[in-house]
Amino acid sequence: MADQSALSSRAVQGMYFEALEAAANIGWLDAVSNYFTSDQASETYPFLGMPPALREFLGGHSMKGLSQNEITIINRHYEASFPVQLKDLRRDKTGQIRARMAEFVQRGQTHFASLLSALIIAGEATACYDGQYFFDTDHSEGASGSQDNDITTDISALPTEVHGVVTAPSKEEMLQAMIKSMSQFFVFKDDQGEPINEGARAFHHQVPIGLWAAASAALSTTNAKGPGMFEVDGISVSLSVNPRLTAGGWTDKFVTFRTDGSIKPLIRQEETPPIPDMLDESSDHAKINKEIVLLLDTWRNVGYGRWQSAVLNTLT
């Protein structure tokens, strides 16, 4: 006779959906990336030049077409399998399977964060739509001239009373470095030589673990608007710490994103969301291996969007 107190595969699957509903999203994803659904193996994104600016009418129309670059993002296949021994279904009286299921869901929720973090880390050596590295010192489009979204800040030269080191700057040094990053956005021009970010009013700083204390202390001296939200001279500023940047070797650099533009600096693309399936008690796998398996399967990928909405700042 079956043990009526034992968990079933249906109960385990229910735990997944329960944990999914309770799981928190990674807040910075929507701020720095556009999300697009896909219905084929890859998607191509055209990056059109800016529409023409107004000029004084002197007779005749000045026709200015849209220049075009593009980037193609190929969907990649990702999967995860969560096996649970049948004996553990019988014996789990302390909620360990539920706890592991919550962690399994969180892994799925952070997958896009993992992909985007790897993309950010690779930005100094990976090309974006204009053929330049995403973070580069010589972007150029049309009449923009040479432009730099890979900048440095010599903290020893900053006019502050307290000096630190590049891996642990003082809060005064960090604040000036962050303001320098935000200022760089207003230098960028479009393919017609017009300022491309003059309407920017919201930025997000993302730092590795080692720079978190200095960045948090720096912004705490400004007008706080809520957890991780600040205001500097009428401009909204948010902050996040990304441990994946630290794991990727970042100790003396951070990235700043413009977050109020319609075209974000990064792209999330998804053909199929993670949909759970189950090898339950009736499956041949369960009969042979004495375990059930929760399966997750998704096709997705990430890519670079508008480089003019991101600035990398390395402390020197």
Image (cartoon, grey):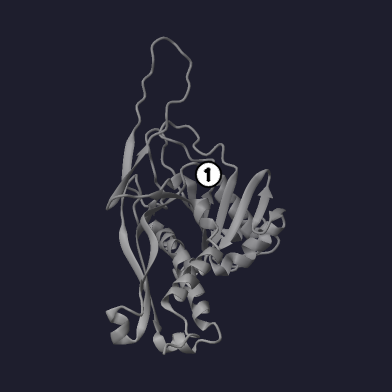
Q: Secondary structure at mark 1?
A: helix
Return the residue found at the far front: 1
Which residue is at a point 69% across and 56% down the rendered structure image? 226
The quarter holding residue 49 reads: top left
Q: Is residue 131 visible?
A: yes
Q: Is residue 251 visible?
A: no
* Residue type pointed to by label 1: Phe
Residue 260 in the image: x percent, y percent?
55, 44
The quarter holding residue 93 reads: bottom right
Residue 51 in the image: x percent, y percent?
42, 29
Q: Which residue is mark 1?
A: 185
Q: On screen, 34 above or below 17?
A: above
Residue 184 in the image: x percent, y percent?
53, 46
Choose between 278 and 266: the one closer to the eye. Answer: 278
Which residue is at a point 35% across and 49% down the rendered structure image? 132
Choose between 139 and 316: the one closer to the eye. Answer: 139
Q: On screen, 144 above or below 308?
A: above
Q: On screen, 19 above or below 237?
A: below
Q: Is 302 displayed left or right of 42 in the figure?
A: right
Residue 71 in the image: x percent, y percent?
32, 47
Which residue is at a point 58% across and 66% down the rendered structure image? 211
The quarter holding residue 88 reads: bottom left
Circle 1 crowding by C-alpha within 10 Å: few under 14, some 14–19, many from 20: many
